[in-house]
Image (cartoon, grey):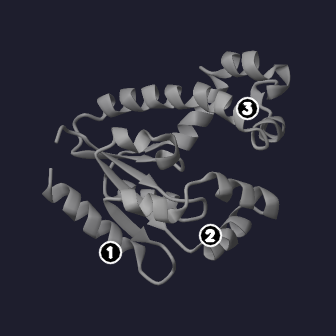
Amino acid sequence: MNKPVKVGITGGIGSGKTIVTKLFSLLGVPVYNADERAKVLTHTLLRDSIIEVFGTNSFTGEKLNRDFMAATVFKDKDQLEKLNSIVHPAVANDFKDWVNAHSDYDYVVKEAALLVETGSYKELDILIVVSAPEKLRIERIKERDPFRSQDEIAGIIDKQAKDDVKLKLADYIIDNGDTQLLIPQVLEIDKKIRQHL
């Protein structure tokens, strides 16, 4: 395998991708957070393209008008596809540049909620899926994001691929359903990845 080996971490909203990614980061593995980078790119490189497609209401001053955009894209599949066609290619290019900048590492991690849905997992060498029961995930989301309504949470979960689809594609699965400790699972996967470099 070419270095750095590209490892993807994904899972449904509330599954615990972020904490798992932090554990890899503590092991010295560079982490690319696709959602965070998408936000940065949206406010910089992609701002004009978004305004061109969605109009001046899409931004309030320098900030993306999240309420307007959510109302526009979450109920209309075509509008969501338009937004994705602007954001996803830009994130893919940004990730390539980032990987090149980290070429002296054995492996790097890309964290993204929609690796399977967008098909971008195919550009990675290894896929890790973080799994947790939906009921537990909903509880976590409500605790973490009290501003989200039940309908909004259900809408997000509905737009994400189901766990059984993701698990079939996974090279490694991390069970974050509160029955197993996370750290030993992450250490074991890190060891296996390094053994196969």
**Which residue is at a point 81% across and 36% down the rendered structure image?**
72
x and y percentages locating residue 171 in the rendered image: 31, 59
Q: Position of residue 101 (x, y in %)?
A: 32, 29
Q: Where is residue 40 in the image (x, y as percent from the top left)?
A: 60, 32
Q: What residue type is labelled 1?
A: Pro
- Answer above or below: position of 157 versus 102: below
Q: Is the residue 181 above or below the residue 88 in the image?
A: below
The answer to whether the residues at label 3 and label 1 have Cβ atoms under 8 Å apart is no
As shown in the figure, which amino acid type bears the numbered disc 2?
A: Arg
Camera-near label (2 vs 3) is 3
Circle 2 is placed at which residue position? 137
Residue type at tag 3: Gln
User: Which of label 3 and label 1 is nearer to you?
Assistant: 3
Q: Can you say which quadrant of the picture contains the N terminus?
A: top left
In the rendered structure, the answer to whether residue 180 lies left or right of residue 7 reads: right
Instruction: Find numbered disc 3 in the image and state the secondary structure of the residue it sits on.
Output: helix
Q: Which mark is residue 184?
A: 1
Q: Residue at x 83, y 40 (%)?
A: 71
- Residue farthest bottom in this picture: 179
Camera-near label (1 vs 2) is 2
Left or right of residue 119, residue 135 in this image: right
Q: Give the secondary structure at mark 1.
A: helix
Which SS class for mark 2? helix
Say which quarter of the image contains residue 139: bottom right
First in residue order: circle 1 vs circle 2? 2
Cα–Cα span, label 3 and label 1:
42 Å
Q: Is residue 149 visible?
A: no
